[in-house]
Amino acid sequence: MAFDQRDWSTAFDALKEADAESTLKPDDLERLAVTSRLLGKDPEAAEAWARAYKACLAEEQTEQAARYAFWRGFGHVNTGDMAQAGGWFGRAQKLLEESNVECVESGYLMVPMAIGGMDEDPAAALDAFTVIAGIAARFNDAALGAMARMGSGRSLIRLGRAPEGMPLLDEVIVAVSAGEVHPMVVGDLYCSAIEACWEIFDVGRAREWTGVLDGWCESQPDLVPYRGQCLVHRSQVIQMQGAWPRALEEVVRACDLFDARPGDPAIGLALYQCAELHRVLGELDEAKTFYGRASDAGHSPYPGLALVWLSQGDAGAAEKTMRRVVSEASDPVTKLRMLPASVEISLENDEIADARVAADELLTLARAAGAPLLIAEAERAAGAVRLAEGDASGALDLLRSSFERWRHLNIPYEVARTRELIGLTFKDLGDEHGASIELDAARHTYEQLRAAPALSRLDRANRPPARADTGGLTGRELEVLRLVASGNTNRVIADTLVLSEKTVARHVSNIFMKLGLSSRAAATAYAYQHDLV
């Protein structure tokens, strides 16, 4: 009764008491293993699965023994003990091969390999999950069917087919919420679905499903394994709403829970989220520490770490790293996460052609994915590139569309970032009054959010325009000209501005062309004649 009511502590105590009086049968050992897992008692869970496995072997119940071996391995996956997990999966596989019978357990044993292949070959993973779904249907197994749909949906997302994949995840959430799925996988399915939402920035589903996961956890006060991940997702939602200090409190709580359970695969996500909040708050040293810890836990520190370097003035290092990271991205989901930062960093380095290539790819991928947040991000990036290219009118159309999408999504920080760019576009169009309104609105939001790096960026961008006698040079070209006029070589200028020598040489060439000059001596004379030094 307590087990069916999800009163895990009472069920655990009753099962342990019954086990002390008389050895439990396999079905009750399964219940003991499940309650132990959900209470965070992983050693007890492992022992109960092993006992159920041995009891079934003794009674020659091969399929049931294979299932218990699978769940024992599944438990090791959740604690990060992959060698032990593989050993138990192998043991189950050997049992089925020796018995040579068709059973649902063969589908369960295909799941770990299919999940492991999603990153390397999502198309092959999709094929495998399709086979698993067929096995689940043939044996009418709801848990395996839910796992197959989840895997198929996430594989489709990695293939850039999110509109096909997300409805499958909706089906899983419905089945889970209706109590149709084995308790061992309910939390994993919830968390996997929410992770998929964040992968493609499906804000509506992320908010809704985080609320559902929250409610599921709260309905079971003694539930342990998913509380940390639940707090991470809650932090992400709160961050979008603009309450950054509270979001940081939530994710710090999650990190504390994970510290008590080393090996949990979700710890990298928690550490990265902690780093992100420190970064946007301007606490850059703390951010770098948490990005490093996330990397140690197996979670990529990018693009966040590269954006920290950009904020600290090391734009050259940031660009080199992001160029490598984007080139190594083998799937659309990863590229969608990396390309916005790549555009921002390239623009900061005045590498406008590179920024244009990245922005165009981002816009193509975002429109294919169909998620409003991704399209808003891509339109803003494309607008920023048009502005840098001198096409203020083209920039304004993209930025206004982006602004409306962000406003509809109700994400204050992103609304402010877009208004900042609209303000700068108005400046280029000569509308100083309109620019002031937009920039003041952006500043007000940044101040409310305590977004120190954004305020610093706004101050730099809002400096008085260069004098007319600069010959049409960009801000970066003026910096290079001043350093040339001071007698610096291209190598010294590159080190000073954290650029490559190739980039500096291109800037020098542009300066000569714009000013009609042919030598560094002439450029130096021009700089002094026009009070640019």
Image: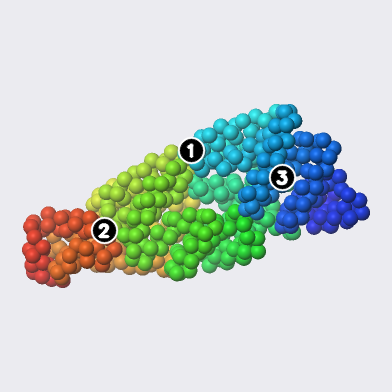
Q: Nearer the viewer, residue 82 or 440?
A: 82
Label 1: state its secondary structure.
loop
Please tell me whether residue 312 is drawn above or below residue 99 in the rendered image.
Answer: below
Q: Amino acid at mark 2?
A: Ser
Image mark for residue 500: 2
Q: Please state the horizontal and vertical placement of residue 48, each as a whole percent of the image.
A: 79, 50
Q: Which one is earlier in the sequence, the residue at label 3 or at label 2?
A: 3
Residue located 72% across and 28% down the image = 100
Give the spatial CA distance, label 1 vs label 2. Answer: 35 Å
Label 3: state its secondary structure.
helix
Q: Nearer the viewer, residue 376 or 229?
A: 229
Q: Which one is earlier in the sequence, the residue at label 1 or at label 2?
A: 1
Residue located 55% across and 36% down the image = 125
Instruction: Using the rendered view, name the quadrant where residue 427 is placed.
Output: bottom left
Q: Please state the horizontal and vertical placement of residue 155, each as a whole percent of the image.
A: 54, 39
Q: Which residue is mark 1?
A: 159
Tag 1 near tag 2, CB within 8 Å: no
Give the spatial CA distance, label 3 vs label 2. Answer: 54 Å
Please tell me whether residue 279 is drawn above or below residue 123 in the rendered image.
Answer: below
Q: Please state the horizontal and vertical placement of residue 330, each as a whole percent of the image.
A: 44, 43
Q: Residues within 10 Å of mark 2 (few under 14, many from 20)?
A: some
Residue 180 appears in the figure: no
Q: Nearer the viewer, residue 312 or 501?
A: 501
Residue located 85% across and 55% down the image = 16
What scheme was used to colour the molecule? rainbow
Q: Amino acid at mark 1?
A: Leu
Q: Nearer the viewer, residue 127 or 90?
A: 90
Quarter holding the C terminus is bottom left
Q: Residues within 10 Å of mark 1 (few under 14, many from 20)?
A: many
Image mark for residue 71: 3
